[in-house]
Image (tube, rainbow, N blue to C red):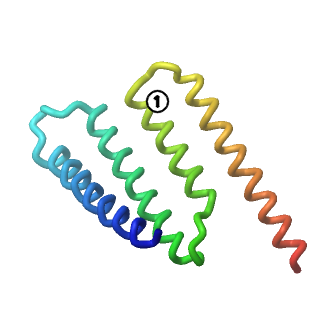
Amino acid sequence: MNIGLILLAIAITILLAKELIDIINNSLFNEGNTSRLEFLNNILVFFLYFEFIAMIVKYFQEDYHFPIRYFLYIGITALIRLIVVCALHTLYYCGAILLLVICYFIMNVANEKSKKEDF
């Protein structure tokens, strides 16, 4: 499984570099050909790739365990991208983001309580 994750990390790194090149080309060398919406979409996709890479790195740092908070970060970023790119069902997406943020808050509160009980 680790070889698969390493190959996935390499593929995502290549895609991350491609998105970075696209962002630089669109911001420096664009002559009005790219819309702001497309530019924002490229930035959000870049952050999604970056979060996946960070999650894979954390997997190896934390003894082959995926922290759930990284899945929440990716979910929130993906939903924000959906809101920006496709403006349909915005209220549903905002509700889903709120639910993910509440889950993250509950997870942090439970984590703090368990740390206090350990001492």
Q: Is residue 85 above or below residue 100?
A: above
| In the image, farthest residue toward the bottom | 119
> Residue 13 location, x and y as percent?
30, 62
Disc 1 designates what residue?
Answer: 83
Q: Is residue 119 left or right of residue 71?
A: right
Q: Quadrant of the C terminus?
A: bottom right
Q: Is residue 35 above or below residue 119?
A: above
> Residue 106 location, x and y as percent?
77, 51
- Residue drawn where x is 30% and y is 43% of the image: 42
> Residue 21 location, x and y as percent?
19, 54
| In the image, farthest residue toward the top | 88
Is disc 1 placed on a helix, strand or loop? helix
| In the image, farthest residue toward the front | 1
- Residue drawn where x is 27% and y is 39% of the image: 39
Q: Is residue 16 above or below residue 5?
A: above
Q: Is residue 54 left or right of residue 64?
A: left
- Residue drawn where x is 54% and y is 44% of the image: 75
**Number of numbered discs overlaid on the protein picture:** 1
Q: Nearer the viewer, residue 39 or 9?
A: 9
- The image quadrant that residue 68 belongs to is bottom right
- Residue drawn where x is 33% and y is 46% of the image: 43
Q: Is residue 105 left or right of residue 5?
A: right
- The image quadrant that residue 50 belongs to is bottom left
Q: Amino acid at mark 1?
A: Ile
Dot 1, crowdedness within 10 Å: few (<14), some or many (≥20)? some
